[in-house]
Image: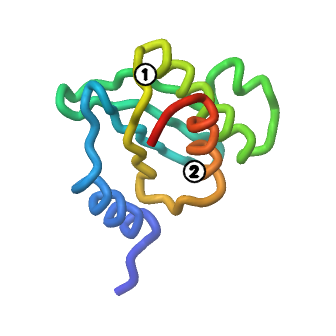
Amino acid sequence: MALSRTDRRDRIRFRIRKTVSGTTQRPRLAVFRSNKEIYAQLIDDVNGTTITAASSRDKDIDASKTSNVETAKLVGQAIAEKAKSAGIESITFDRGGYLYHGRIKSLAEGAREGGLKF
């Protein structure tokens, strides 16, 4: 029996999460992509808390009216700014079961341009 897209993505996501986890000094940058929006959050898995988050629904990013890939890059830069203000410079990247391509890749490149190391 063939798996649905969400089942396949969940399997990949769980496989990634077995190895990728975040700490207070090096949090996990978790990415969620819907058809319209893209969300990113820095998570400390040791304490089970979200340190900071950014999404394409934020006021300044939503007002830019750019393409999905360019919006993802802006979200990456926004999460990098928020991380810098929280005193975080290095992270681990959790692509959330999505291919490292398109909007996911653009978000990662935006975060790197913002000064995050991963």
* Residue under pointer 1: 52
> Would you identify the image quadrant in which residue 76 lies?
top right
Residue found at the far bottom of this picture: 1
Left/right of residue 23 with respect to residue 89 in the rendered view: left
Q: Residue at x 61, y 40 (%)?
A: 37
* Residue under pointer 2: 104
Element at label 1: strand
For the N terminus, the quadrant is: bottom left
Q: Are marks 2 and 1 in contact (CB under 8 Å)?
A: no
> Would you identify the image quadrant in which residue 8 lies?
bottom left
Q: Position of residue 4 (x, y in %)?
A: 43, 72
For the C terminus, the quadrant is: top left
Number of marks in the rendered image:
2
Q: Give, as a three-letter code, the residue at label 1.
A: Thr
Q: Residue at x 56, y 20 (%)?
A: 81
Front in this rendered view, residue 28 or 39: 28
Q: Give, as a three-letter code, the residue at label 2.
A: Ile
Q: Residue at x 56, y 48 (%)?
A: 34
Residue found at the far left of this picture: 46
Q: Characterize the local packing of mark 2: few (<14), some (14-19) or many (20 or more) Cα atoms within 10 angstroms.
A: many
> Would you identify the image quadrant in which residue 21 lies?
top left
Q: Position of residue 50 (x, y in %)?
A: 34, 25
Q: Position of residue 52 (x, y in %)?
A: 43, 22
